[in-house]
């Protein structure tokens, strides 16, 4: 018997989209990939604070150390 199409949980999709958007914003602000991934997955960390630090020439690894 064939299986019908699978459905994804809307919450999982929303979370995935949010993390992807946060990641892209951090990369645009100058973060490297590894540090952008760390911060993008931590939704308890303010994206605005992270980008402000990067805008003020804070190195991405220091940004993560400050915010985590």
Image: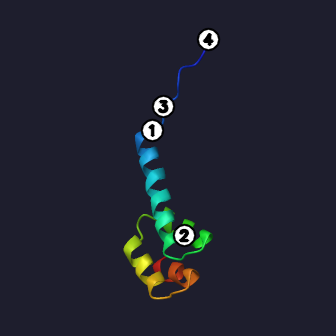
- Is mark 3 in CB contact (under 8 Å) with mark 1? yes
Q: Is residue 33 visible?
A: yes
| Residue for badge 3 | 7
Q: Secondary structure at mark 1?
A: loop
| Residue for badge 4 | 1
Please name the residue shown 44% across and 77% down the image: 50
* Crowding at mark 3 (Cα within 10 Å: few <14, some 14-19, many 20+): few
Q: Earlier in the sequence, mark 1 or mark 2?
A: 1
Q: Position of residue 17 (x, y in %)?
A: 46, 52
Q: Position of residue 29 (x, y in %)?
A: 48, 75
* Crowding at mark 1 (Cα within 10 Å: few <14, some 14-19, many 20+): few
Side of 12 where 38 appears, left or right? right
Q: Earlier in the sequence, mark 4 or mark 3?
A: 4
Total numbered labels: 4
Q: Is residue 59 above or below residue 28?
A: below
Q: Is residue 16 above or below residue 65?
A: above
- Is mark 4 in CB contact (under 8 Å) with mark 3? no
Q: CA distance from mark 1 to mark 2?
A: 25 Å
Please name the residue shown 42% across and 63% down the image: 43
* Crowding at mark 4 (Cα within 10 Å: few <14, some 14-19, many 20+): few
Q: Quadrant of the N terminus?
A: top right
Q: Secondary structure at mark 4?
A: loop
Q: Earlier in the sequence, mark 2 or mark 3?
A: 3
- Is mark 2 in CB contact (under 8 Å) with mark 3? no
Please name the residue shown 58% across and 19% down the image: 3
Q: Is residue 46 visible?
A: no
Q: Secondary structure at mark 2?
A: helix
Q: Earlier in the sequence, mark 1 or mark 4?
A: 4
């Amino acid at each position: 018997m064939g299986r019908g199409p699978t459905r994804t949980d809307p919450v999982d999709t929303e979370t995935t989209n949010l993390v992807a958007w946060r990641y892209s914003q951090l990369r645009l602000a100058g973060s490297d990939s590894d540090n952008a991934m760390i911060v993008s997955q931590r939704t308890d960390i303010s994206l605005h604070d992270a980008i402000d630090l990067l805008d003020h020439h804070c190195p991405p690894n220091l940004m993560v150390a400050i915010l985590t």
